[in-house]
Image: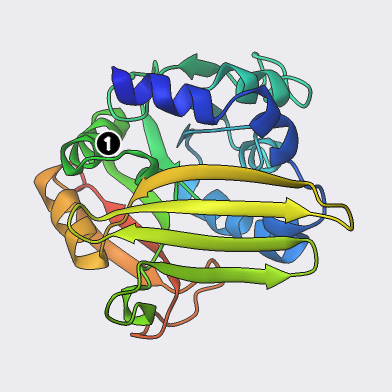
Amino acid sequence: MEQDRNQEKIWDADAAQRYDTPGTGMFAPEVLGPAVDRLARLAGDGPALEFAIGTGRVAVPLAGRGVPVTGIELSRPMIERLRTKADDTTIPVIIGDMATTAAPGEYTLVYLVYNTISNLLTQAEQVECFRNAARHLAPGGRFVIELWVPELRKLPPGQAATVWQSEPGRIGLDTYDVLRQHVVSHHFRFDDTRRAELFRSPHRYIWPAELDLMAQLAGFGLESRHADWNGAEFTAESRSHVSVYRLPPAP
């Protein structure tokens, strides 16, 4: 599929090399620790499947907690980076997209973190991602999604971009196409020279209510929604959410 090829170009060897930032950013203990703690509790005594496992940011410490983890990942360079941390016996990975690819076995938990469901650029593919999660889960199993809330309230009339990061050496901005619910994230990195690096990734943003309808179409019910992995209350001002969907238990 054309979209798969485009995603492979985005998440290439250079992106995989830049992705890991040990101890900082998304790898900071205060960011990663609560996510791993919550996922371990939700997995219980069963195995977990991570959609878009990437370089193993979450899977490696989760497996270290004793949770059997399998992954699905489209980018071979990201998998190669993961293999420097865990072999294929410890964390098996199936190459493919998260909307259609099947992993062997049955799971108590499927999870998709750090906004990655938005890498699927059509509503139909996002719905299929929910259905793919449901196919992998045992009765009563859970699908967990971490996703940002679109910041359209920051867009005044006639403006198509918002700045989400501004600090020494880094600028981040999002450009919106509100007709198609598309956004492109632009990551600029620079130093004291006149040279700068730019990384861009396209996304389709999803409102929480739309996400809940996708879940319903796949047979899930919303079990909980919080503003973060620590369980903070989700409000109208929350910038992201952790939503836990659950299949009905066996009769």
The structure residue drawn at horizontal position 30% and vertical position 20%, both measured from the top left corner, is 2
The structure residue drawn at horizontal position 54% and vertical position 33%, both measured from the top left corner, is 53
The colour scheme used to paint the residues is: rainbow
10 Å crowding of disc 1: few (<14), some (14-19), many (20+): many
Relative depth, front residue between 114 and 110: 114
Which image quadrant for residue 213? bottom left
Q: Amino acid at mark 1?
A: Cys
The structure residue drawn at horizontal position 29% and vertical position 40%, both measured from the top left corner, is 121
Q: Quadrant of the N terminus?
A: top left
Q: Measuring from the top left, give residue 74's x and y in whole percent.
A: 47, 22
Residue lying at the far left of the rendered structure: 217
Relative depth, front residue between 178 and 249: 178
Q: Is residue 64 above or below residue 147?
A: above
Q: Image check: 24 left or right of 62?
A: right
Q: Measuring from the top left, give residue 140's x and y in whole percent.
A: 27, 46
Residue lying at the far right of the rendered structure: 192
Q: Which residue is mark 1?
A: 129
Q: Measuring from the top left, give residue 38's x and y in whole percent.
A: 55, 58
Relative depth, front residue between 88 and 115: 115
